[in-house]
Image (cartoon, rainbow, N blue to C red):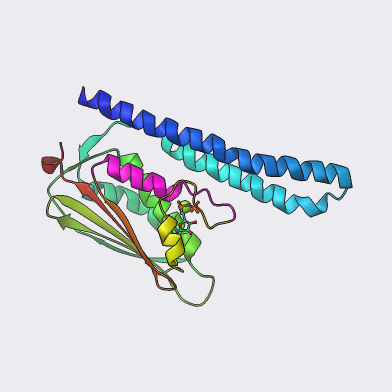
Amino acid sequence: FENLLTFHHQMEAVSHIAAGVAHELRNPLSVIKGFMQLAKLTGDHEKYYDTVISELNRMNNIIEDFLSVSRKKIDRKQQSPVHIMESLIEIIKAECLLHDVNLTLEISEVDQLVYVNESMVKQVMLNLLRNSIEAYGGSNTSREFKIKSYPCETVYKVIITDNGKGMPNHVLEQLGKPFFTTKESGTGIGIPLCKKIIEDHGGEFTIESELNVGTTVTLTLPFTSYNQ
Ligand code: ADP
Ligand code: MG
């Protein structure tokens, strides 16, 4: 019965997001339509290509971000949080290598287990890394990405830090609102979904950031002995 409730809750979340995604896709679609009509009327095609391509990219990102979550099976298992972190490391290392990011890892051992959907937790971590990669400046400072995790009373805590451009207050205030983005081809789905996934697991998700210094995300996963 409890499983059914969780399932219902999660399906509700997915359909809520689906409605938002459909709504969000209409904006770039109408921009594309308008620009195509203009191109046809004026015969001036070149001028409109960049906008059309950038709107198509945005649509693609929205669909990618959405599918990556709705596609996941939502069953959970009791697992070691350390095992989850370790199975993530290979992809994270590869991504960091590809984007010239220095990775620091401090993963503390723990005997206790967490009750999670592993692929959803992975999705959260990869989303956060992607945001960091998009926040690094192009210049001379090295790009640092740090993952520190350790048991803390009733939870396993994961702290993720970057030294990217950080966020001004007006961005921090909006953060977590679905579809809020400051990027040209952004979707604004990443952070709300990360928050939703962690909260559905009974954990907490918080973000601190300082402009021109960097961003720190803290998430917690409750140990099974303290969770339902
Ligand atoms: P998207 O990445 O598609 O814009 P997100 O929900 O992932 O959507 O992020 C929302 C906004 O939060 C981003 O557009 C960006 O302005 C800000 N943001 C998120 N993570 C970071 C980060 N690590 N550093 C700086 N800004 C960030
Ligand atoms: Mg993002």
Looking at the picture, how far across and down is residue 116, in whole percent? Answer: 25, 39
What is the quadrant of residue 138 in the picture? bottom right
Q: What residue is rendered at 48% in x and 33% in y?
A: 18
Residue interval drawn in magenta = 184-202
- The N terminus appears in which quarter of the rendering? top left
Which residue sits at x=58%, y=52%?
185
The mark tally for this picture is 0
Residue 99 visible in rendering: no
Residue at 60% over, 42% down: 59
**Is residue 51 depicted above or below 15 in this figure?**
below
Whether residue 88 appears in magenta in the rendering, the answer is no
Residue shown at 52% from the left, 41% from the top: 64
- Left or right: 28, with 110 as reference point: right
Q: Quadrant of the C terminus?
A: top left
Q: Is residue 93 above or below residue 143?
A: above
Left or right placement of residue 14 versus residue 27 in this view: left
Q: Position of residue 90 (x, y in %)?
A: 36, 52
Looking at this view, name the residue that lies furthest to the bottom: 140
Q: Position of residue 171 (x, y in %)?
A: 46, 61
Q: Is residue 189 visible?
A: yes
- Locate residue 156 relative to residue 92 in the image: left or right: left
Residue 58 image position (x, y, % from top left): 59, 47
Query: Which one is in front, 23 or 193?
Result: 23
Looking at the picture, does residue 171 appear above or below residue 55? below
